[in-house]
Amino acid sequence: MLKQPSGVLRRMHACTLIFEIIEWAPSPEYLALNATYSELLSNYTNLSDNYNSLVANYSTLNDDFTSLSANYDGLLDSYDGLNSTYYNLQRNYDSLSSSYDTLEASYSALIEEMSSARNLSYVFITTTIILAATAIYLAVRRTMVKQPALS
């Protein structure tokens, strides 16, 4: 038989093959390469776990964002409605304030007119009383002057 390197197939006869397995001893380069591979595999596993965790966090954050965005849109619609209502109420208030000012001016003018009318009424009543008193006085005096003296 011919001696061959370990793990190599040898041929004894034309049709018969014999395979001999011998113990294998790894070389230092192989051990260093295997250690590097194990370290890289560990790093890959850690990175893959971190990536999966980040994907899960992203999915959760995206769901939260979608929910908060919908909530924001609802609040924005409510704000627009309230803002519109505020401006309508402000317009109504301004209109009512203008009407109040107009009515207050009319009221003040009427009070002045009524005060003038009341003062004129007092003057008329006083003049009427004086005129009536003068007429009575003159009527009584006239009757006293026309009556002959009883002597």
Image (spheres, rainbow, N blue to C red):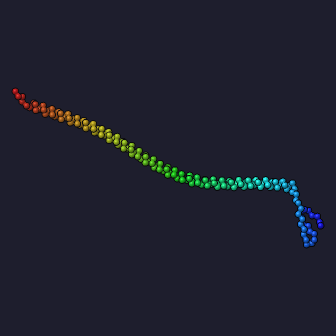
x and y percentages locating residue 49 in the rendered image: 71, 54
Q: Residue at x 45, y 48 (%)?
A: 89
Towards the viewer: 40 or 143: 40
Q: Position of residue 88 (x, y in %)?
A: 45, 49
Find the residue positioned furthest to the left.
151
Outermost residue on the top side: it is: 151
Relative to residue 140, is residue 71 drawn left or right?
Answer: right
The residue at 94%/64% (across/down) is: 3
Q: Position of residue 20 (x, y in %)?
A: 89, 65
Please state, as top left, top right, bottom left or bottom right, where the C terminus lies in the image.
top left
Looking at the picture, how far across and down is residue 74, in whole percent?
54, 53
Judging depth in this view, the residue of 35 and 120 nearest the camera is 35
Q: Residue at x 88, y 59 (%)?
A: 24
Tell me what residue is drawn at x 61 percent, y 53 percent: 64
Q: Quadrant of residue 122?
A: top left
Q: Is residue 73 left or right of residue 131?
A: right
In the rendered view, would you say 122 is above or below 85?
above
